[in-house]
């Protein structure tokens, strides 16, 4: 069973949009519907990187990265911002989210990115621990949501 990321196109659009319906009512309050995220991707063009998350050939989630860092401190740039992330309810807590972050780090390395940012709320059943367990560090800044950051580690001598 292999996690992989694919562009959202006409043929998988409906399935990706429907994944949002699987979230709990609580989760729906904190994550924009995939339909809305795809509209944001459309208006942002090349500045957004939306991808369907697949388990082998089955779409099970959605991720979107903002490829610009206008609000990010200069010393952390080039930087990406993990903007949207959701896994269909039946596929949560199975280790797939962590594998998606691994793939995202690979992309950051390919693109020579210095820092990956994200944000989340802290109350209730929020994925704050999911992110901090993975290696994101709380910046202590709250901009409506808690801002988390991770420095991308490059192995000395590695080609990527
Ligand atoms: C957040 C989300 C993407 C994580 O994906 P996932 O596939 O469920 O995560 P994983 O199974 O890879 O979890 C990895 C670790 O994080 C922990 N974790 C996952 N979600 C968590 C949560 N909400 N709160 C606390 N810990 C969490 C897991 O228990 C696991 O811990 P372990 O390594 O000690 O076993 C997914 O749960 C989801 O879609 N949630 C609803 C939407 C959402 O909140 N999106 C993020 C908006 S900021």
Image (tube, rainbow, N blue to C red):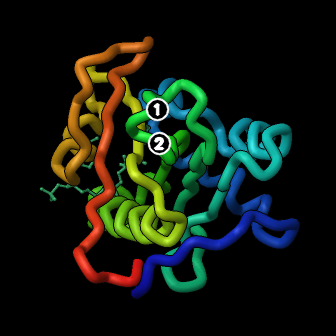
Q: Nearer the viewer, residue 86 or 80?
A: 80
Q: Is residue 37 above or below residue 1?
A: above
User: Is ligand 1 less than 8 Å from the beta carbon at label 1?
Assistant: no
Q: Are discs 1 and 2 less than 8 Å apart at CB? A: yes
Residue 92 is situated, as x and y percent measured from the top left of the image, at 35, 57
Q: Residue furthest left?
A: 133
The front one of 9 and 106 is 106
Residue 156 at x, y = what percent?
23, 75
Q: Which residue is at 38% across, 61% downward?
A: 101
Residue at position x 65%, y 38% from top?
Answer: 33
What residue is pinned by disc 2?
77
For mark 1, does the 10 Å Cα neighbourhood hold few (<14), some (14 to 19), or many (20 or more) residues? few
Mark 1, secondary structure of its residue: helix
Q: On the rendered image, what quadrant is the C terminus found in? A: bottom left
* Left or right of 151 on screen, residue 72: right
Front residue of 122 and 107: 107
Q: Nearer the viewer, residue 74 or 24?
A: 74
The image quadrant where one finds the N terminus is bottom left
Image quadrant where residue 98 sits: bottom left
Mark 2 secondary-structure assignment: loop
Label 1, on which residue? 74
């Amino acid at each position: 069973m292999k996690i992989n990321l694919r562009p959202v196109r006409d043929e998988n659009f409906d399935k990706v949009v429907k994944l949002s319906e699987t979230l709990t009512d609580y989760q729906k309050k904190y994550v924009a519907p995939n339909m809305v995220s795809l509209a944001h991707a459309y208006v942002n063009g090349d500045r957004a990187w939306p991808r369907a998350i697949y388990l082998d050939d089955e779409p099970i989630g959605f991720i979107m990265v903002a490829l610009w860092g206008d609000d990010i401190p200069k010393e952390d740039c080039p930087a990406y911002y993990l903007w949207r992330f959701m896994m269909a309810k039946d596929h949560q807590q199975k280790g797939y989210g962590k594998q998606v972050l691994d793939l995202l780090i690979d992309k950051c390395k390919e693109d020579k990115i210095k820092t990956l940012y994200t944000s989340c709320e802290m109350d209730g059943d929020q994925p704050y621990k999911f992110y901090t367990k993975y290696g994101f560090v709380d910046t202590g800044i709250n901009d409506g949501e808690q801002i988390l950051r991770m420095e991308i580690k490059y192995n000395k001598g590695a080609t990527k």
